Amino acid sequence: MSNLLVPRSDVGEFRKRYKWMALAAVLAFLTVVARLFQLQIVHGDEYSGLAHENIIRRVILPTTRGVIRDANGKVLASTRPSFDVEVIPGRVMPSARPVHYRNGQPMARDPDSWPKLAEILRLNPEEKRTFEERIRVECTSDDDKSPCWRTAILVREDVPRDIVAELKQHTDELAGVDVVAVPVRFYPFKELGAHMLGYVAEIDPEMLATFRPLGYERLPHEEQQRVNPLGYEAGDRIGATGIERAWESYLRGQRGWEKRVVDARGRYRTGPDAERLVDPPARLDPIPGRDLRLSVDLDLEQAIDKAMRPRAAGAVVAVDVRTGRLLAVYSKPSFDPNDLSGGEGRARVREAFNRVYADPLRPMLDKTMSGAFQPGSTMKPFSALAGLEDHMIDPEHTEKCEGYVTFGHRIFRCSHQHGPVDLDQAIARSCNVYFFHLAETVGMDRIARIAQAFGLGQKTGLGTNPEAPGRIPTRSWYALRYRGQFRVGFTLNMAIGEGDVTVTPLQLALAYAALGNGGTLYQPQIVRSVETSDGAVVQEFPPRIRRQVGLQPENLRRVTDALRNVVNDPLGTAYPARDTTLDVSGKTGTAQTGYQAKKDDEPKMAWFLSQNHAWFASFAPSRAPEVAVVVLVEHGGSGPEIAVPIAMQIIHEYERLQAARLGRAPSAKAAPPTRAGKP
């Protein structure tokens, strides 16, 4: 007993050590608590976000671009489904990543799925080698934020459906491979109306920089929305030309997104367990773009295409005289917007651009509004109005045409020797000599004032493609250009639409529409309404008047009666090609191009470029005009022989379509000609 009561020396030693052990345990516990506080409280959001990013991927849901329809509901531009194949470099080819070691031994890696993908996509050896090199470059580093894991590489665009099906069958063998559904713009009528509709293209870095300036990612969401309201990102497609560009904000729509769970091999996981890992909101549905209803009639466009088929180049514009709405806008040669919109890959886009820009007939130029041409004799009605309005000429006075006039040391020629002609006959027979004398009397500035009042030499403001303003010169313009050395010959050329006078077919069509409707110059419109996908009208655009040209009714009537005689008088320039079932008023034009051949020019092209431009500007029916049609056959030759038959064919088809749609009888045979100003 006594031994039990005696304190042992080793127990005291243990108590001394126990204090230190307890202190060490407390310190270790505090260290763990501090570290947990740092990880979960101080940096909790950061690490939680990183962990979340490792398993949750936000997948962009593309929006559907708005549909473009013609006036009768026929689809001119829509969206078709397309499938692109993308790969995550580090997952599709683990062998390209740097080797990592554990305990001195290289760590095992998953097998490459790249060879199987290359086999399914039928990549040739060169393509396969190129993509493998790109994957290795991206995987120089394989940390979590490196391109090896964050950058998807596009391998194939617009993959055929049979290959898509094969890829789906081998999903388990294709780690890191993703088949992405991408909407592609589709133009069912190909080249028809291509300049009017335009095309879409991948946004270029310069334009993207305007929407996503430096520091964009650090901006608050509200500020990002302000500078980039349509959410453009690299690789997006944007309207490049035509209606696609001008109405981009309506057509584009808003992208959506969806959160998906991915495993370590980049495969998507579904089911209840995966859904629980996704924090709300799990999805934002895309908002489709608005649809556009045009004023253009596709059937009329097709009729124009048929009428212009024998001709190499030119333009046609048809305008509703009563509203200024465009019924047809046609430019030739054209291009296939499907090739330029990128649906079939970038190689096809490069090939298409190389082809169209190598064509000397300039297929990319919208000749209805971007090209300015000398109008020839289609200018004469405005010269006549200038003389009538200021009482500078007597319409009954006759001038004797001997086929030419001499001013100074220069001879100005006429197409024929017409003999004595008054104003009506001078317009109907297109007598240059009469208008040379008129120009000398009236003066350049008076002619310019009337021409500009009808919108010639000015941009129309349509806005679908860049507009050439054209040119209606004045004495002050010549004073600046020739330093005061003004010549009477400038005015003579202007009166017959030659020299420095240039207009666009669109300007001329609107001007002749104003002649036909009594002097109302309309703002041209090509979009009639904005609609939802189910056809509900969101916004409609009523006709807009630019100006009312102040003219004496009797003067305008005298000129329009003379235009009617151009077609219906046996001596009128358009009489041989008239359609006796139509009542058409108009003016022919044959405009010299002034082309000078060069030594290295190809002979056939040099001959073509040396030919005159053929014009016919018209409206119909004469007594109650509905449509104005302007035809330009570029380097076509004679206006009466080449342009008039095309215009008659177009107007005939317009009348037929209107009669069929409205259930009315076609136009009656044209009435006999009248003398201007007389019943």
Image (cartoon, rainbow, N blue to C red):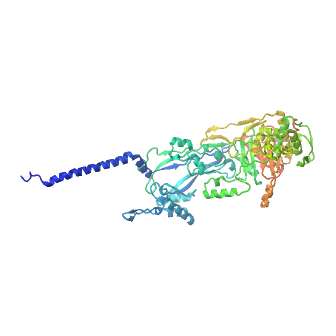
Task: Looking at this view, name the residue that lies furthest to the left.
Answer: 2
Q: Residue at position x 72%, y 36% from top?
A: 545
Q: Whole-percent x and y of residue 623?
A: 81, 37
Q: Residue at position x 50%, y 50% from top?
A: 59
Q: Would residue 581 be visible to someone looking at this image?
A: no
Q: Whole-percent x and y of residue 561?
A: 84, 38
Q: Nearer the viewer, residue 361 or 577?
A: 361
Q: Whole-percent x and y of residue 194?
A: 68, 50
Q: Is residue 119 left or right of residue 197?
A: left
Q: Nearer the viewer, residue 228 or 304?
A: 228
Q: Is residue 323 left or right of residue 7?
A: right
Q: Quadrant of the C terminus?
A: top right
Relative to 336, residue 672 above or below: above
Counting labels gives 0
Q: Would residue 195 be visible to someone looking at this image?
A: yes
Q: Is residue 258 left or right of residue 273?
A: right
Task: Looking at this view, name the residue that lies furthest to the bottom.
Answer: 125
Q: Nearer the viewer, residue 677 or 395?
A: 395
Q: Whole-percent x and y of residue 270?
A: 44, 51
Q: Is residue 478 left or right of residue 218?
A: right
Q: Residue at position x 63%, y 38% from top?
A: 539
Q: Quadrant of residue 164?
A: bottom right
Q: Nearer the viewer, residue 673 or 676?
A: 676
